[in-house]
Image: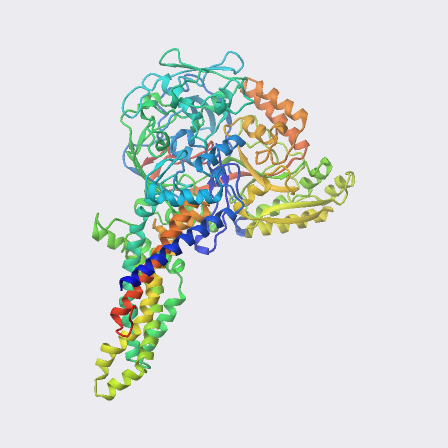
């Protein structure tokens, strides 16, 4: 187990460095000078040069990358923005705020959105999927299957505003979606995020319903299930004691990736509900050609995927005794 | 002032954004979002009726009461973007300047009266400044009772310091007119001659004989320097509270409000500054107790919220978000919403630059203007309300001295006159010229390009369209030796006189890579006329001089004027006193009160 974790962590660090390097170089492949954003309307060449110097952009690319990387551990002082203590991911070109603290500030929004939605997605998705598999071919299965197709066909940017219009603007049943820190007021936090959770769940739950149903049906056709039944075990016991374990492996794999993707930024959801999370930050970074923020968000998103993949691998061993990490 | 519309293409429909007036010299692509249905509008976007320099009496506070207004309550502001800069020295954007007016005061400022005329008046100063040598030396006297938010008096030393710190190496985003004029040699970079106050050195060209008097000794006459110092970029900053780079996040107030908290990209909270005295302020009211400002709303979202007009949105306005183009017709047909609408002519003009280094024959350039399908392009862009009034001059109607003129008959034949263009081409050196038209590759611009190609082809042009990436548009057209003949651009005067509307763009001596003279026009007579106009001290006479230069430039056919940009926005039913600010080209917070 220990050697497995060490191997995976080292691999993860290599992947993150590689991703940051690629992002860094791709940014400079765009024929645009970010320094111009820091120069007035009538921008004399000497001011442009001064800005490039202030931002460290007058140095060779590999030096710039090294400065960025080393600042994570030792910090850095920028003429344009002031000191940036470690862990320093630089300053945003757009907001002139430290990238690291901005991401830390935004992360609770995305985490709240993601975790809340995950609870709904997993609860409803797995439950309805298992019920559909349990009652395969019966009306319950048909209802679950067809409603999941409808759910999967919808788009957040379509049903999001629709739900807000109905529940907020017309009926006034719920407040307009926003983020209030959980630590500040748990109830307000819950109520204000209810609509985004439900809307996000409508899309994702459908996938999990369908996946759980098909995985359960696949498992129920396995030899070990047939053997258990032949030995006289009741259908209910086989279903809930054995078959679900096998079905969960691919679901956990997909959920790990989905969760990491959402933590890296539920872009459309955050944009639709004006939630200031990592996803909204990513969009703004792209639109503003904000390299430091783009790098920061990309690396954090990549780290979420890499870490959750390791967690998923470890979880396999706990769920399915046939899996051994070594 | 800086103002432009930047169009950003995004990957998904939900991320599609509308026009945003962001920084700088006209980034983006010209033309509005498509909405052919919005071609008719019952609205009249009025220009300012007059721009004058006010007297000392005009400069005294308090500002005239807004009928029915009462103090108290919280006014909400919803908009797409957070303010990119709050340090006055780093403010150039009209959007930043609009909020800055609530907590930053300058030596002078603009006062609008009920008739729509604008006066330059003293803000911190007792009047709009005096000069006795044609604009080379300017004197301002500070009012009694002007204070910082901690109650200490604003002194002439503070004003001197505010200008000195603009030379620091981290203040690069704001205007640099005054800096260039306050050093001995205007032809050398100003930072080579003075590096700011942080090493203990002072700028000798600003004199403060006492706590109330500031005297500026410029290196050349600038008769409209009193307009220059009305820019937010020349707002007051106290030496004792200057936190250098960090000042951008928490400026110290000299205005009616002070910053309580600012969470970047989320919200800004303002509360009353108890040490602001309305009797010293001729332009600000400060009726609400607080302002709550929220960011991150696209124009579609803010339009929906204004139309719904529920909860706290009833007390909401927006500085910049316009009505989403696709909702314009709905709003025009909604009598209740129209009562809560605002429209006006912004200082921003758009046009198509004709590269005079490549299109050297003036008759060919005239033929381009004559054949130009202005009406069709306006329809594609969503009509006047989504784009602007068809322009025929360099100067905007919002500039002092603007004179209506239509040298190419574009108002009579806005759809273009191919036959007249053919005649012009026949008298030129190349009767069937090839024109390389560079454009932002956006859906609207693709349609506009087809209309331009079609119209110019009828006149005998061979148009080669070159699509450019919107993200790098200005990098592509910036070099003097670019390979394009015609390309879109836009401009807003930094203050409402002709000098900053015309000189940066059409003074041939300022041609350089990425400089604003995108037409590369270099006509000695125009350069000389610019010098002469810059010497005229009487504002009215100066206005006439700039209007004459406008006609000279149009005689040279250096641009195809496109629009005098218009603004159309909404606000909530629970607010009064919301008005259009013709200087910033968006909604003003200065007269707002909560019902």
Residue ID at (52%, 51%): B35
B585 or B197, which lies in front? Answer: B197
- Left or right: A270, with B47 as reference point: left
Question: How many numbered tags mark residues here?
Answer: 0
Horizontally, is A288 left or right of B539 in the view? left
Q: How is the image coloured?
A: rainbow
Q: Is residue A300 visible?
A: yes
Q: Is residue B66 left or right of residue A2?
A: right
- Frontmost residue, B542 versus B429: B429
Horizontal and vertical percent for residue B321?
A: 43, 43
- What x and y, as percent, mark residue A297? 38, 50
Q: What is the quadrant of the C terminus of chain B in the image?
A: top left
**In front of the other: B219 or B451:** B219
Please identify the quarter of the rendering in which residue B593 is found. top left
Residue A259, visible in the rendered structure: no
Using the image, determine if residue A118 lies above or below residue A63: below
B329 up-or-down from A154: above or below = above
**Residue B408: percent from left, percent from top:** 67, 36
Q: Residue furthest front?
A: A3
Q: Nearer the viewer, residue B44 or A229?
A: A229
Residue B250, image x, y percentages: 33, 33
Is residue A189 placed above or below B510 in the rendered structure?
A: below
When asked about the image quadrant of residue A288, the answer is top left
Q: Residue at x 64, y 29 (%)?
A: B551
């Amino acid at each position: 187990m220990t050697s497995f974790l060490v191997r995976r962590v080292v691999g993860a660090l290599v992947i993150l460095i590689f991703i940051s390097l690629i992002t860094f170089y791709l940014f400079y492949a765009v024929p645009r000078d970010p320094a111009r954003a820091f120069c007035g309307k009538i921008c004399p060449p000497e001011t442009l040069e001064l800005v490039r110097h202030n931002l460290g952009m007058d140095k060779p690319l590999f030096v710039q990358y090294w400065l960025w990387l080393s600042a994570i551990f030792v910090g850095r002082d920028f003429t344009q923005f002031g000191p940036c203590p470690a862990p320093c991911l630089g300053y945003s070109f757009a907001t002139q705020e430290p990238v690291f603290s901005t991401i830390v500030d935004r992360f609770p929004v995305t985490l709240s959105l993601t975790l809340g939605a995950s609870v709904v997605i997993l609860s409803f998705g797995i439950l309805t999927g298992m019920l559909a598999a349990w009652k395969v071919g019966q009306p319950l299965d048909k209802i679950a299957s067809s409603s999941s197709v409808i759910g999967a066909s919808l788009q957040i940017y379509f049903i999001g505003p629709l739900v807000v219009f109905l529940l907020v603007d017309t009926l006034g049943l719920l407040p307009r979606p926003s983020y209030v820190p959980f630590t500040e007021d748990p109830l307000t936090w819950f109520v204000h995020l209810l609509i985004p959770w439900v809307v996000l769940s409508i899309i994702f739950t459908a996938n999990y319903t369908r996946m759980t149903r098909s995985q359960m049906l696949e498992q129920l056709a396995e030899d070990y299930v047939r053997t258990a039944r032949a030995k006289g075990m009741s259908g209910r016991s086989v279903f809930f004691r054995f078959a679900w374990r096998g079905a969960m492996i691919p679901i956990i794999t997909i959920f790990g990736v989905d969760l990491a993707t959402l933590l890296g930024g539920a872009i459309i959801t955050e944009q639709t509900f004006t939630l200031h999370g990592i996803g909204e930050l990513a969009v703004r970074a792209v639109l503003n050609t904000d390299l430091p923020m783009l790098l920061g968000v990309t690396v954090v998103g990549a780290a979420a995927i890499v870490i959750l993949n390791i967690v998923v691998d470890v979880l396999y061993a706990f769920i399915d005794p046939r899996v051994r990490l070594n | 002032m800086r103002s432009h519309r930047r169009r950003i293409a995004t990957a998904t429909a939900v991320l599609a954004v509308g026009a945003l007036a962001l920084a700088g010299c006209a980034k983006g692509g010209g033309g509005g979002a498509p909405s052919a249905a919005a071609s008719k509008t019952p609205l009249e976007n009025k220009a300012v009726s007059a721009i004058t320099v006010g007297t000392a009496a005009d400069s005294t506070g308090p500002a005239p009461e807004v009928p029915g207004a009462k103090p108290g309550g919280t006014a909400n502001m919803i908009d797409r973007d957070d303010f990119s800069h709050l340090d006055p020295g780093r403010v150039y954007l009209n959007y930043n300047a609009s909020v800055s007016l609530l907590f930053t005061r300058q030596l002078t400022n603009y006062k609008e009266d009920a008739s729509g005329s604008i006066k330059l008046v003293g803000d911190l100063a007792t009047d709009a400044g005096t000069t006795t040598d044609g604009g080379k030396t300017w004197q301002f006297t500070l009012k009694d009772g002007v204070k910082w938010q901690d109650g200490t008096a604003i002194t002439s030393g503070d004003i001197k310091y505010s200008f000195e710190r603009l030379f620091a190496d981290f203040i690069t985003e704001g205007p640099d007119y005054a800096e260039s004029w306050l050093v001995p040699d205007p032809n050398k970079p100003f930072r080579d001659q003075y590096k700011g106050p942080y090493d203990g050195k002072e700028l000798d060209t600003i004199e403060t004989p006492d706590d109330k008097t500031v005297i500026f000794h410029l290196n050349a006459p600038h008769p409209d320097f009193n307009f220059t110092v009305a820019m937010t970029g020349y707002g007051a900053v106290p030496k004792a509270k200057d936190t250098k780079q960090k000042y951008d996040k928490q400026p110290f107030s000299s205005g009616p409000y002070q910053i309580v908290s600012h969470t970047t990209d989320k919200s800004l909270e303002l509360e009353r500054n108890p040490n602001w005295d309305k009797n010293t302020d001729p332009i600000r009211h400060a009726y609400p107790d607080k302002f709550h400002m929220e960011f991150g709303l696209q124009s579609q979202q803010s339009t929906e919220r204004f139309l719904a007009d529920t909860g706290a949105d009833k007390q909401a306005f927006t500085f910049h978000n316009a009505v989403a183009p696709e909702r314009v017709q709905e709003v025009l047909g909604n009598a209740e919403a129209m009562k809560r609408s605002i429209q006006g002519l912004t200082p921003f003009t758009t046009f198509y630059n004709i590269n005079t280094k490549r299109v050297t024959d003036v008759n060919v350039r005239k033929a381009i203007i004559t054949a130009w399908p202005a009406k069709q392009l306006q329809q594609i862009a969503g009509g006047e309300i989504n784009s602007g009034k068809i322009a025929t001059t360099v100067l905007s109607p919002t500039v002092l001295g603007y004179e209506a003129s239509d040298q190419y008959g574009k108002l009579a034949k806005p759809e273009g006159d191919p036959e007249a263009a053919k005649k012009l081409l026949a008298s030129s050196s190349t009767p069937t010229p090839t024109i390389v038209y560079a454009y932002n590759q956006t859906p609207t611009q693709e349609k506009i390009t087809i209309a331009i190609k079609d119209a110019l082809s009828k006149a005998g042009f061979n148009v080669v369209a070159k699509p450019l990436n919107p993200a790098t548009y200005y990098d592509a057209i910036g070099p003097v030796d670019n390979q394009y003949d015609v390309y879109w651009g836009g401009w807003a005067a930094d203050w409402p006189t002709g000098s900053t509307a015309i000189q940066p763009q059409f003074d041939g001596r300022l041609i350089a890579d990425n400089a604003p003279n995108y037409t590369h026009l270099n006509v000695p007579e125009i350069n000389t006329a610019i010098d002469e106009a810059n010497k005229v001290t009487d504002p009215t006479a100066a206005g006439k001089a700039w209007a004459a230069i406008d006609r000279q430039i149009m005689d040279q056919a250096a641009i195809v004027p496109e629009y005098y940009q218009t603004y159309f926005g909404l606000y909530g039913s629970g607010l009064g006193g919301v008005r259009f600010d013709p200087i910033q080209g968006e909604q003003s917070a200065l007269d707002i009160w909560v019902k």
